[in-house]
Amino acid sequence: MSFAWAKPYEPKSTFMKYLDERLPLPRLVYGAIGGGYPVPRNLNYFWNFGVLAGLALMIQIITGIVLAMHYYSYAGGAFDSVERIMRDVNAGWVLRYVHQNGASFFFAVVYIHIFRGLYYGSYKAPREMVWMLGLVIYLLMMATAFMGYVLPWGQMSYWGAQVITGFFSAIPLIGEPLRIFLLGGYAPDQAALTRFFSLHYLLPFVIAGVTILKIWSLHIPGSSNPTGVDVKNERDTLPFHPFYTAKDGFGIGVALIVFSIFVFFLPYSLGHPDNYIEANPLVTPAHIVPEWYFWPFYAILRAFTVDFILPAKLWGVIAMFASILLLFFLTALDRSPIRSTSYRPVYKIFFWILVADIMVLGYAGQAHITPLTLAMSQLAAAYYFAHFLIILPLVSKFEKPLPLPNSISESVLHGEKQESAPFGLAKTGGTTAAVPAPAE
Amino acid sequence: MATVDQTSQPFMPGEPVAEANGGEGVRRRDFINVAAVSFAGVGAVAAVAPLLIQFSPSDDVLALSSTEVDISKIQPGQGIKTVWRKQPVFIRNLTPQDIAAANQVDVGSLRDPQTLADRTKPGKQNWLVTLGVCTHLGCVPLGIGEGEAKGEYGGYFCPCHGSHYDTAGRIRKGPAPLNLVVPEYSFASDTVVQIG
């Protein structure tokens, strides 16, 4: 229970009382997602994406377990088993489309969730651990998605496995032996396929475990909120149920509609046709690109073309991993005490430039390599690092933030006309917006 | 707490919203609640359907439903073991003695009363086609191969739990409840049997 006024669980029936005394599961649920968990009352729809990520994980685990009943991780038959799922297994097509597009859905939701965290300063104290556990989940997701993509054993699967495991060969001295060790051979083959399948089945459960830790950690300070101002008293919060179960329920409905459009009408829109050609170790597809959710990182990887002290290949791999590991140090890089970017006029500009920069990296990551796209990815990669290592520390040092509201409830109740804008930022004159005080 | 000016003070959770309507009776909110949860429930059931129907035999398994067997080489007293739907099928060419033994039995005394004629095709009484699956717990009985134990009644003997079948494949002794199952089959010609 995060706040003093959080309501303790009171069993309504004798059965629940009996259960609660012996196994306080109802108490746990009530305190985590029930009426006993007070949540800031001003959360906007961006706060739906944590629950949506959990939903996506459940969809992937459930459909994945079922698909594993029909898939076989045999290099000579994996490709055919996937085709059999599509043609012969009852409802196999829908299960596979949901799982295949579900990966994209999961990443899309998580990216919005991450940018929500970046914009509203969710990584700042006291939620640093929540942020870092989220990054661990993200890294696990990337590993899981990569290994899952290998399983259909098509051309993109095979060459994806070849390229990604090739990262390890960039490490000096131990690189190539390490790559062979990880693959269990000189090139992706039966050994690699079987271990990828085993790990692809394992890692989602590790993700689920880390998710539990993350929620545990989150529920100590409770959710952040769009103003970034701390919860001060009961007026600032609402019980999770029914207020946020209803809001999340609505969000889930909208998200599932969008997801269904992809599953039923555009199932191939995010994939590559080359993956419907069975893996051939002797022919590389002409244009090999990862799935869309890896494009920005792929652009960073390819941006390094010149040996400088270290070989270019190693630079690319280091930069790509660094681009994510950097985010673990975000709290140290951004020293501004203001959480919400709505009150940080200078950082706000750079935040949106960063978003645009990552879009450019994404475009460059999927484009054919030409001098233009290469220059684009080099500039954008340089800016990505500059944003976190130079701009962010400087801005947080010199920026003069806008006045913060005194409390969440004051922010919520500053008048109908201003309700869509953060407190003190609305253009039109309000009733109580005149005298905002700075935060502590 | 009962009346709160919404413009100056936030709405407090836990307040009885219904009070304003007079409390008793079905509220709009109750209806919306039930409607929303039912709608989600129907959706959830629809979403579970594919997770369950994938368990049933897939199209390529169902495609195994029919098989043709050449029986021209089977001499009287011999039998073959073939496969239909991944299950063993016994095709046996009965000798006149086998047929006589099967017809001597008082049908009323059997656990699963059937005559040999019930279990074969008219005019082809010497061809006994049964699943090679014991009706007790699914083992494959002995007796179709050369030199295998045929049991006390000269038909089949299941080594798992000791069920004895006679020359018409009927259960005579042991724990099995029913005669060996006669699959759906027909004679495509005098020498070809189509099972399924």
Image (cartoon, coloured by chain):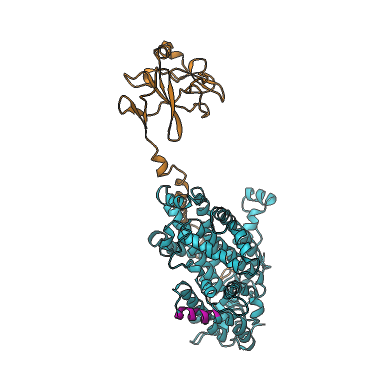
Chain colours: A cyan, B orange
Is residue B16 in view from this perspective? no
Name above or below for residue A301 compared with residue A189: below
Is residue A434 in view from this perspective? yes
Magenta stretch, main secondary structure, is: helix
> Residue A342 placed where, x, y %?
55, 81
Q: Which residues are magenta?
A: A371-381
> Residue A79 placed where, x, y %?
46, 53
**Residue B123 in which image quadrant:** top left
- Could you say which is closer to the camera, residue B186 or residue B112? B186
- Could you say which is closer to the camera, residue B140 or residue A229? B140
Q: Quadrant of the N terminus of chain A?
A: bottom right
The answer to if B112 sits in the magenta stretch is: no
Name above or below for residue B191 compared with residue A86: above
Seen as rendered, the residue at the extreme left is B189
- Could you say which is closer to the camera, residue B144 or residue A21? B144
**Residue B5 in which image quadrant:** bottom right
> Residue A305 placed where, x, y %?
54, 77
Q: How many numbered badges does the structure rendering display?
A: 0
- Could you say which is closer to the camera, residue A353 or residue A28? A353
Name above or below for residue B70 compared with residue A424: above
Q: Quadrant of the C terminus of chain A?
A: bottom right
Name above or below for residue A259 compared with residue A438: above
> Residue A231 placed where, x, y %?
63, 74
* Left or right position of B64 against A189: left
